[in-house]
Image (cartoon, rainbow, N blue to C red):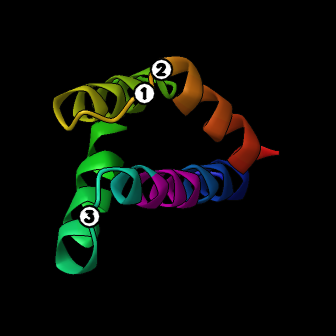
Amino acid sequence: MSDDFEFRCARIKQRNERLARWAGRQMGFSGPWLDAYVEEVVTADYDSPGHDDVVRKIAGDFLSHGVALGAEDIRRRIGQLDG
């Protein structure tokens, strides 16, 4: 693997970790629950290329936890984290 590819993968993983911490806090997670949720989100990113799999996971979790944020809110947050 090239250094550029490895760097990009590391940046995406870090972004997903920050995104997952934000999302987990929206659902009231903390401590070990939040850490476990971060791992779930990072693993979800391996389902398909791009971040749609992560958006689907978090949006579904928000829905099941009664959080009034949707896919567009999550994509906006990704943009902020990437910016």
Q: Nearer the viewer, mark 1 or mark 2?
A: 2
Left or right: 67 as drawn, with respect to 33: right
Q: How far is the residue under mark 3 from the one under mark 2?
A: 19 Å
Looking at the image, do the residues carrying marks 1 and 3 touch, with CB atoms under 8 Å apart?
A: no
Percent position of residue 70, x then y: 44, 22
The residue at which mark 3 appears reads as 29
Q: Is residue 44 highlighted in magenta?
A: no
Left or right: 21 as drawn, with respect to 38: right
Q: Start and end of the magenta stretch? A: 13-22
The residue positioned farthest toward the right in the image shown: 83
Q: Which quadrant holds the C terminus? A: top right
- Which three-letter amino acid code belongs to the residue tagged 1? Val
Q: Nearer the viewer, mark 1 or mark 3?
A: 3
Q: Does the rendering let one see residue 47?
A: no
Q: Does the rendering let one see residue 75?
A: yes
**Disc on res. 71:** 2
Q: Dot 1, crowdedness within 10 Å: few (<14), some or many (≥20)?
A: many
Residue in view at x 53 percent, y 32 percent: 74
Q: Quadrant of residue 10?
A: bottom right
**Disc on res. 55:** 1
| 79 vs 14, nearest the viewer | 79
| 55 vs 30, nearest the viewer | 30
Is disc 1 placed on a helix, strand or loop? helix
**Disc on res. 19:** none
Q: Quadrant of residue 69?
A: top left
Q: How far is the residue under mark 1 from the one under mark 2?
A: 6 Å
State which tag comes first along the sequence, 1 or 3: 3
Q: Dot 3, crowdedness within 10 Å: few (<14), some or many (≥20)?
A: some
Question: How would you classify the magenta stretch by its main secondary structure?
Answer: helix
Looking at the image, do the residues carrying marks 3 and 2 touch, with CB atoms under 8 Å apart?
A: no
- Which three-letter amino acid code belongs to the residue tagged 3? Phe
Looking at the image, do the residues carrying marks 1 and 2 touch, with CB atoms under 8 Å apart?
A: yes
